[in-house]
Image (tube, grey):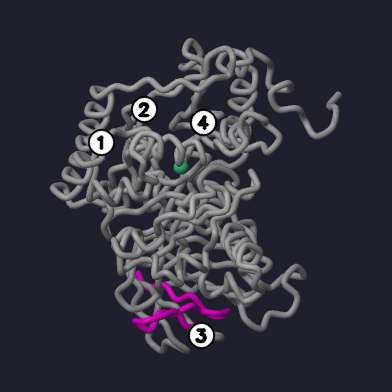
Amino acid sequence: MKTLIQGGYAVGFNGKEHEVIKDGVVVFENDRVVHVGKQFADPVDRRIDAKGCLVSPGFIDTHFHSGSNAGDYLLNEPDKPDFFASNYLAHGAPTREGGKQAHLKDVDVGQRFSLVHLLKSGVTTTLEIGGPGGDPERYVEMVGALGIRCYTGPSYKNVDFFHDREGRLEYDWSDERGSAGLKGAVDFVKRYHGACGGRVQTMLFPGHVDTCTPELLKETRKAAKELGVRVQIHAAINLIEFHAVMRRYRLTPVELLGKIGFLDPEVSLSHCVFLTGHSWTAYPYGDDLKRITDSGASVAHSPLKYLKIGVAMESFDRYLKAGINVGIGTDTFPKDIISEMRYAALVSRLVDKSFIAGHPRDVFNAATVGGARLIGRDDLGRLQKGAKADITIINLRDIAFGAVRDPIKALVETAAGRDVRTVIVDGEILVDQGTCLRVNEDELIEKLQARAEEIWAGVPKWHWTGKGVDEVLPPAFKMK
Ligand SMILES: [Zn+2]
């Protein structure tokens, strides 16, 4: 079936870079784009009117964790004192006896909700770190039914974290846990790589530089090369990790990865904020940025997660200028990649003290071709003949946008996920008129709220203080 998207601003790809075609057309047949240009004379089976819209390549989310946003809220609320600068540790480290209570990921509600949220904000390909951990078969089935393109695999590490009742962080190391985790991840790759008509692809996701032994990391690279899959690891993501690795090896996290031969173009580093020269590390020695550039590794940048704790990558522009390929991620919540582009741009301006930093062109590239390069795909993140028909249509004809001269600048300056009108993956329309066609959204929201209430009620069972959610995370105002 041949479909023509008519009107608006079509973002074509000329083989080198994006170009915007005013009143353009995008034509796709089955799962492939067949034409992008000013017009198309041949007959088509279906037409989509995109007047006043940006017809964009579907966005690629290079770092994302699914699960109920109730859990993510606990992780992200900025006034949670034990969260400051330690991100996942405050949430991912329950008490020893409460371990099982803290994570209520499930395929039917939390994970489904997350992927629907992503799709509705225009993401057509996501890297879901650790997604299929609990129930791989049903997880893959659910991804298949929703229609999104997903690079995924269970995450693994040597360490289990806990807080003791005084709030002290404990690391439990186990070589066996690490190798069993890697084995499970390799089995997942062998079983599901290319599932759901190729929409499910797999990767290896060792947890973090400070939670895996160098041996496990070396084994990971070896296994990934044998399997022909890519690897992503959380690296340089908080000060605790930076100092833990410094203390153990007298190397920065990036130096350690370089030294053990982990870094190359098939590897991406999530977050990668706390590098030598970053103002928080107060460590002026070495050149982590150059080490990443020389290795060809990519960086998955999720700015909002760090803004929430008052930390910034230093900086998006500096990484690009160093020659590093950067993709955009949404990480936790909200999962709105269009807003993430805006945050990436604005934070770079602030950090660089330059109003010409964080150009809309560069953040749009990061969310499209940058993401595609990170996963080694030249048929994603662009609209040109032969590319996958992964397309996001965003409405720019609204009072909120005023007069539009440059649609990419309008998108980055003003738009949010809620402006996304249509999302197409592999030529299938998954979101139309802002509604996900493959789920009952009302029902999903209702189930999510009920699940969230359960999670909040369960906080005293796993939080080291034993206190209720309103004490751990006081509401903005008194609630009656
Ligand atoms: Zn993460």
Q: Secondary structure at mark 4?
A: helix
Q: Residue placed at 41% from the left, 80% from the top?
A: 17
Nearest to the observer: residue 65 or residue 305? 305
Tell me whether the residue at label 4 lies in contact with that at label 3, contact meaning CB atoms closer than 8 angstroms.
no
Q: Which residue is mark 1?
A: 185
Q: For marks 4 and 3, give the CA distance.
A: 46 Å
Check mark 1 vs ligand 1: CB closer than 8 Å? yes or no. Answer: no
- Left/right placement of residue 211 relative to residue 260 reads right
Q: Position of residue 85 (x, y in %)?
A: 58, 39
Residue 234 shows in this picture = yes
Contact, CB < 8 Å: mark 1 with mark 2?
A: no
Q: What's the magenta region?
A: 1-20
Q: Nearer the viewer, mark 3 or mark 1?
A: 1
Q: CA distance from mark 4 to mark 1?
A: 23 Å
* Dot placed on the residue nearer the N-terminal end, 4 or 2: 4
The quarter of the displayed image where residue 343 is located: bottom right
Tag in front: 1 or 2: 1
Quickly name the residue at label 2: 134
**Amino acid residing under circle 2:** Gly
Location of residue 31 (image quadrant): bottom left
- Looking at this view, name the residue that lies furthest to the left: 226
Q: Residues within 10 Å of mark 2 (few under 14, many from 20)?
A: few
Q: Which residue is the site of mark 4?
A: 89
Q: How many marks?
A: 4
Of the 4 image quadrants, the one containing the N terminus is bottom left
The earlier-in-sequence mark between 3 and 1 is 3
